[in-house]
Amino acid sequence: MNILEHVGIGNYITLSALLFCIGAFGLLYRRNAIIMFMSIEIMLNAVNLLLVAFSSYHEDPSGQVFVFFTMAVAAAEVAVGLAILVSVFRNIGNIDIDNLKNLKG
Amino acid sequence: MNTTILLLLFAPLVGFLINTCFGKSLGKTISGVLGTTAIVVSFLCAICLFSQINANGKSFTFHLADWFSIGNIKINFSFLFDQLSVLWLLFVTGIGSLIHLYSISYMHEDENMHKFFSYLNLFVFFMIALVAGSNLLIMFIGWEGVGLCSYLLIGFWYKNQDYNDAAKKAFIMNRIGDLGFLIGIFILGFHFQTLEFLEIKALLGKDVITPSLLAIAALCLFIGACGKSAQLPLATWLPDAMAGPTPVSALIHAATMVTAGIFMITRMNFLFDLTPEIQNVIAIVGAITAIVAASIGLVQNDIKKVLAYSTVSQLGLMFLALGLGAYEVAVFHVITHAFFKACLFLGSGSVIHALHGEQDMRNMGGLRKVMPITFWTMMISTLAISGIFPFSGFWSKDEILMTAFHSNIPLWVVGSIASIMTAFYMFRLMYLTFFNDFRGTEEQKHHLHESPALITIPLVILATLAAIGGAISLPGHSWLNHYLAPLFAHKSHEAHTLGTTEYTLMAVATIGALLGIAIAYSKYLKKKEIPIADSEVQGLHKVLSSKYYLDEIYMVTIVKPIYMISSFAKKYVEKFISKAVIGIGGATYALSIKGKKIQNGNIGVYLFAFIFGMVGFLVYVFIIRDVK
C-alpha cells in the first residue's frame, strides 16, 4: 500500500521546506547553543523526511538507506557537540554563543 | 684505460676540492704540494694517452655519463681523445705542473696561498674539460669555467680596487665573446640536431644548412674565439689581466687559456674550411691584432705589460695562420709560444720577486750579474720569440710567415713587421732589465738575489723547451704535421718544398729580427737610453702608450651610453616600477585591514552569512539560471 496515494508528495515537500526554514530561523535567532543544536537537528530531519518521501515516490529504497546513515552521523555529531558544550559550560559558566569569542584573532 | 682518463679529468678537481675545504688547515707548503701533485698526476695520465694515440693513431670517445636530451638533441658528458686534444692536454698539464711548482715558492708569502692553488687547480680542470670535451656544450662548460677562474685569479689580490676592476673587465669582455660563441652553438645545434664534433663533421657534407647560415655560425664562433684569445676588438682585457699574480699571467694569460680560441677554431676546422669568407676575416683580424699589439708593446714600461702585448700580438699571428687554413702551423706556434712565453712570464715573475713587487723597467737594470739563471733562461726565450735560428720561435713564426707569403703578400708584410717589432721590444725589455746599472733604490739593491730553486727549475725546463721545441715541426720533416694530419681535410702545408723562396724568406725574417735587435741594442745598450716619464710622452709615442686610445674609445662609445641608459632607468623606470609594486602591496594591506573586521568571532554573524550565502546560491541555481 503506498502512503503517497493518501497524502500527495507536494505536502511532504511543503512540510519539509517549512521544517527546514524553522530550523534555519531558529539557528539564526537563538543564542543558546543547545537550542541551536536542536534547530540543526530539525533541519537535518527535514532533509531526512524529504529523502524518505522521494524514496517512496521513486520506489527506490536507497533513499531510505541514506536516511539511516544521516541519522547515525547526526547522532555522532550531537555526541561530539554536546561534549564540547559541556566543556564550554564548565569553563565559562554559560552556553550563550555571544560569549564564545575568546579565540578571536 | 678508464682509470687513466678519470684520473686525468678529475685529479685537478679533487685537488681543488681538498684545497678549498681543508687548504687553510693544511698549511701553505702542503696545500701547494697537493695542488702541484694533482696537476702532475694529470700530466702523467696525459703522457700515457699521448703515447697510446701517437703509437696507434686511433682516436676514441670516452662516455662518462648522460646529461640530458631535448627532442632529438642528446647531450652527454663525453670526452673526445684524438691527436689534437691529447697534444693540447699534454702541454696544458705539463706547463701547468711547472707553473704550480713555481707558485709554491712564488706565492709562499701570501696568506691565501691555499686559495690560489685551489683556483689554479680548478682552472686546469676546466681547461681539461674544454680541451677534451667531445661536444660543443662540454667545451662551453670548460670555456666558461676558465673564464671564471681567470676572473678569480686576476682579482686574487682583491684588496686593490684596480685589480678588481681589471678582473671585471676581463670577465665582461669575455662575456661578449661568449655570447657570440653561444649563438654559434645554438645555430649549429638547431640545424644539425647534435653538438658532437664528429657528428657535425659527418653531417656537414649533407646539405642540412645553408652556406650563409653556416657562415654566420662560423662568425659567431670566431667572435667567441676573439673574446677568449684577446683579438681586436675584444683585446683590451688581456693587458689589464696582468694585475693577477705572475704565475697566473704565465699559465692563463699566456700559455693556456688564451689559446682556447685557437683550439676551438682548430677543433672546428671542418666548418671553417667551408666558409672561406670567415677565414679571410680571421686572417685579417689576426694580422691587424698582431701589428697593433706589437706597436703598443714598443713603448710599454711595465715588464708584464710588454709581455702581455707581445702575447696578444703572437695570438694575432696564430689567428693569421688559422685564417689561412694552416691549422697545424697555428698549433705549432701555440706550443712553442706556450714554452717561451711561460718562461718569459715566470722569468719576469722572478725579477719582480727579487725587486719586491717592482714592475717598472725604468727602475730595473743590471740584473744580469745577480740573477744569472733568470737572465739566461729569459734570454733564450727572448731569442726564441724574436725568431732567431735555431730556437723554437724561429721555426713556428717562419712557418706562419711562409704560409702568409704563399697566399697573401700584404698579410706577410704585416706579419713580418709585427715580428720585427717583437724582436725590438723583447730586446728592449732584456736590455732595460738586465744590462747597464741598477736604477732602483739602495734598499732594493741591497736585497737583490737570485730566486730559489723552485723558481729557477721551471725556468730552466721551459727555456730548454723553448730552445729545442722547434724540433717537433722542422720544415721538410714535420712530426707535428704528420701527427695532426688525420684531423684536417686538406693536405698539410708541409708540401712546400724547401726552395730558394723559402730560404730567402727565412733569411729575410732573420734579418728583420736582427734589425729589431740592433735598434734596441743601439738605443738601450749603447746610448743607455731610459724611457721617459709618462707625463713627457708626446705625439705618436703618446698614441701608442695610450694603446691607441682603445679604452677611451670604448669608454665613450659603449660604457658611457650604457651608463646613461642605466641611470635613466634607475631614476625614472625603476621609480615607476617600484611605486607600482609598492602601490599594489599598499592596496592589499588596506583591503585586509577593512576585511579583517568581518571575522569578528561572532558565531551568529558567521551563521547568518553562511545561510544567506547558501540561500543566494540556491536562488541563483534554481531560479535565476532557470529563468535564463
Image (tube, coloured by chain):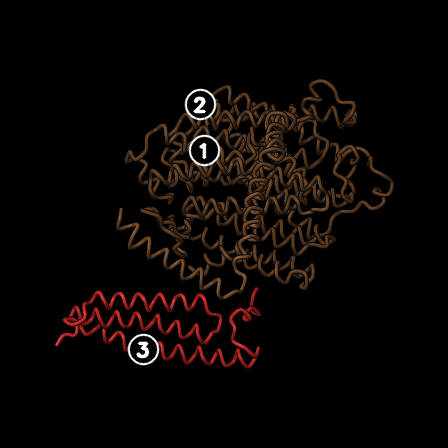
- The quadrant where residue B36 appears: bottom right
**Chain B tint in image:** brown
Spatial distance from mark 1 to mark 2, Cα to Cα? 25 Å
- The residue labelled by disc 3 is A71
**Label 1: element kind:** helix
Q: Are marks 3 and 2 on the same chain?
A: no
Q: Chain of mark 3?
A: A
**Label 3: element kind:** helix
- The residue labelled by disc 1 is B220
Please indicate whether residue B277 sits to the left or right of residue B156 in the image: left
- The quadrant where residue A12 appears: bottom left
Image coordinates of residue B216 in percent, x first then y, are 41, 30
Spatial distance from mark 3 to mark 1, Cα to Cα? 78 Å
**Chain A tint in image:** red
Spatial distance from mark 3 to mark 2, Cα to Cα? 102 Å
- Binning the other alpha carbons within 10 Å of mark 2 as few (below 14), some (14 to 19) or many (20 upward) gives few
- Binning the other alpha carbons within 10 Å of mark 3 as few (below 14), some (14 to 19) or many (20 upward) gives some
Identify the amino acid type marked 1. Cys
Q: Can I make out residue B95 in this image?
A: yes
Q: Can I make out residue B254 in this image?
A: no
Q: Chain of mark 1?
A: B
Image coordinates of residue B451 in percent, x first then y, are 74, 48
Task: Using the image, tell me which numbered label, if any, was put on residue B426.
Answer: none
In front: label 1 or label 2: 1
Please indicate whether residue B372 sits to the left or right of residue B597 in the image: right
Pick out the residue farthest to the front: A6
Identify the amino acid type marked 3. Met
**Label 2: element kind:** helix
Q: Earlier in the sequence, mark 1 or mark 2?
A: 1
Identify the amino acid type marked 2. Ser
